[in-house]
Image (cartoon, grey):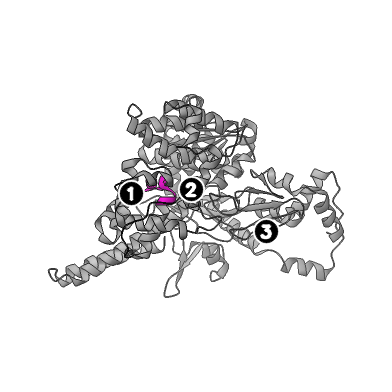
Amino acid sequence: MSDSFTNELLSRTNIVDIIGGYLTLRKSGASYIGLCPFHNEKRPSFSVNSAKQIYKCFSCGESGNVITFLMKYNGMTFPEACKYLADKLGLEMPKRHRLTEREQQELKNKKSRQELMCDCLLQAQEYYVFNLQDSKEAKTYIAKRELNEDSIKKFSLGWSGSEYKNLAHKFPDYDDKLLMDVGLVLQNEELRKRDRFRNRLMFPILNENGKTIGFGGRTLNNDQPKYLNSPETEVFHKGKELYGLFENKKGIIKEKKALVVEGYMDVIALSQHGFDYAVATLGTATSQTHIQKLYRYTSTIIFCFDGDTAGREAAWKALNECLPILKEGHSIRFLFLPPEHDPDSYVRAYGGTQFKNQIKSSKPLSIYLLDELKTRFNLNEAEGRAGCYSFVKPLIATIPKSAIKTQMEKEVSKLLNLTHEEFLADLGLSDTDFKKADRPYKKTKIKKSTRTSKVSVEPLEYKFIKLLAMYPYLTQKLSARHIEILKKFPKYRLVHEFINLIYKHQISVYSQLLNQVDIDVDLLQILDSIESSPLNLDEVESPEEVLKDTLQRVELDSIQTEMSEIAQREDLEHSQKESMLQRLNRRYIALRNH
């Protein structure tokens, strides 16, 4: 394709219009900003410059023009991206000239590595599909799950085989490094190779364009894990993909809604019962990338979770991901099945009509949020309402300015017996000032400590306290296990005391600390330093991400401390001491590699 035609496409296309069709962008100076679609983030770092017709993420570094965006975001080839733009502009693609042998060879050599990987995975898929007819075990399981031939064919179900090197039958060059790169083959320390998937029912995972990018395998015996996914590769990022999206894309568009479930079998069973608009995350929590991807096909997303504790936790995480990208004209709903059922078992037990009734009874995001607040807090007491206020205000603050945000503010205000103005006031802070309250140290002075000597505090403890002082709502994200660790180890005494202080006085913004008289003098010194030495977060690094990193470091440090204490104990037998140290070391390595 000639450079002149490519340049014409770029000059006549408004990059903001194209990218704005995929992402939520808002004006910021001369550019438009939004959440980067190429990595998970809480704060927008993705900038689109209409004057220069380029985009750039200031966090992960992804950048380019509208063509490279379409190639990266949609997995298009260069010609496909150009044709997409040409069709939008009403331009005819130039006819391709006949390639010389040399040009053909060059084109062949340029065939992208990603295409080679997808080709390799497709060949494996064909092999697994062929194997299925010879597996009595797999057929028995499929019959038990009541799957018909149409479902088996639609989702290309297969069987891995039971040998250690099943794929050697398909790939004569079993030592080809590509088989390892796509996650089909493993190699141990002795350099011996074997298949990753053995004795498993295979679920091919396709991207939006129908290319095979990975697999999920379900064991039919007692092997662990029960479900095994392909590893992260150049073509497979499980935190971004949705199982069943390609197969059910037409159904989603036709029905004008998408149903997000948790498992492969849920998607297949629902499709078999007429609900061909379901997709599933791949063993990960719902992310904003998942939501944005679905927004391209529908304006209505229904999250369907089991009614047990795990399901409700997953739903709450999904709500948190939805809030920063809520759009007017879009609908997010939540459906909870009885605790003993998942979508697969429910639709098999009660049929499609009953499940359709369940969908009709799903709750809008706003109602689900209000119901959760009623469950989590005793709103009949002032203390409960105060705690609820501290908890929900930061959540509402993440919603982009819109009519839906205003409506939710009013609904929550009503729940807390506040006027809308009182809800926004936040002890003198307006709605627009609320985000500034996250970093109040610029204008606020805390009373000086009478102690002159500098308190001795570990750097990690010092950072932790400053983080919680600037973002008190983060205390709501601490688990009982984390609190127990902080309480157990003396080096984190001040952190534990500070958390108790925040809980006790329902601190929601830093300025409220000024009015407390029961603050430890050591804590006062640390808080006093925030103005002169604030915690510097990266522009695009969220407080939640910093908290997660800090908690991991605290836990690693606590394990090391515990190992040191055990090593010095004289009341333990040598074998007992070794066993305890090995157990802690395994925990340390697992946490460090997480």
Report the magenta residues as a range. 469-479
Q: Is residue 551 visible?
A: no
Q: Secondary structure at mark 1?
A: helix
| Residue under numbered circle 1 | 499
In the rendered image, residue 476 lying in the magenta stretch gets the answer: yes
Judging depth in this view, the residue of 155 and 354 nearest the camera is 354
Residue type at mark 1: give it: Ile
Quick one: quadrant of the C terminus?
A: bottom left
Residue 5: percent from the left, percent from the top? 85, 56
Which of pointers 3 and 1 lies earlier in the amino acid sequence?
A: 3
Residue farthest to the left? 571
Crowding near pointer 2: few (<14 within 10 Å), some, many (20+)? many
Q: Position of residue 489 (x, y in %)?
A: 26, 59
In the rendered structure, does residue 483 fall within the stretch colored magenta? no
Q: Can you give x and y, in whole percent of width and height, for residue 350 in the image?
A: 43, 27
Q: Position of residue 370 (x, y in %)?
A: 44, 30
Q: Name the residue that disc number 3 marks.
A: 63
Q: Secondary structure at mark 3?
A: strand
Residue closest to the eye, 524 or 278 = 524
Q: Residue at x 38, y 43 (%)?
A: 507
For residue 18, side relative to residue 195 (left or right): right
Q: Is residue 489 visible?
A: yes
459 with respect to 214 (left or right): left
Q: Closest to the observer: 100 or 147?
A: 100
The residue wearing badge 2 is 438
CA neighbours of label 3 inside 10 A, class few (<14), some (14 to 19), many (20+): some
